Image (cartoon, grey):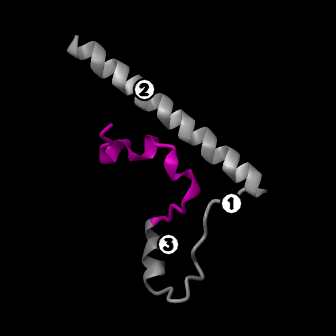
Amino acid sequence: MVILMGDIKKTLTFDLFARPSFIEGMSRVMDLGSNLQVYNHSKTELDADAKAIHNDWRMVGKDIESSIEEYKQKN
């Protein structure tokens, strides 16, 4: 499945990574000690794993849905 830049926010696999604003991104240039590096945290490791697995399966579903739509258009 091809994801265009406009669609990148629609994907769910980025939920586990930090998404800095422009200002935060600029400040990271000067952050030599990685003190500003903040990730999306969960209460427990089990909770983080559950969220990741849930999002993975949602993306699998989106891929299947996209494949079905593409197949319908070709046939």
Between label 2 and label 1, give the one nearer the viewer.
2
Please give the label number shown on residue 5. none
Q: Is residue 66 above or below residue 39?
A: above
Tell whether 66 sits left or right of 11: left
Residue at image point 62% right, 43% down: 53
Local packing at callout 1 (Cα closer than 10 Å; few below 14, some 14-19, many 20+) is few
Element carrying mark 1: loop
Q: Is residue 46 above or below residue 20?
A: above
Q: Is residue 23 above or below residue 31?
A: above
Q: Specify start and end residues of the magenta stretch as a single range.
A: 1-21
Residue 49 painted magenta: no
Q: CA distance from mark 2 to mark 3?
A: 36 Å
Residue 46 versus residue 27: which sits nearer the camera?
46
Between label 2 and label 3, give the one nearer the viewer.
2
Residue position for label 1: 41
**Location of the C terminus (image quadrant):** top left
Residue position for label 2: 64
Residue 52, how many percent across, how many down? 61, 47
Residue 42 versus residue 23: which sits nearer the camera?
42
Q: Amino acid at mark 1?
A: His
Q: CA distance from mark 3 to mark 1?
A: 18 Å
Residue 17, how many percent across, how many down? 54, 60
Q: Amino acid at mark 3?
A: Glu
Tell whether 60 sits left or right of 47: left
Residue position for label 3: 24
Residue at image point 49% right, 29% down: 61
Residue 44, how many percent across, how many down? 78, 56
Residue lying furthest right = 44
Between label 3 and label 1, give the one nearer the viewer.
1
Q: Amino acid at mark 2?
A: Ile
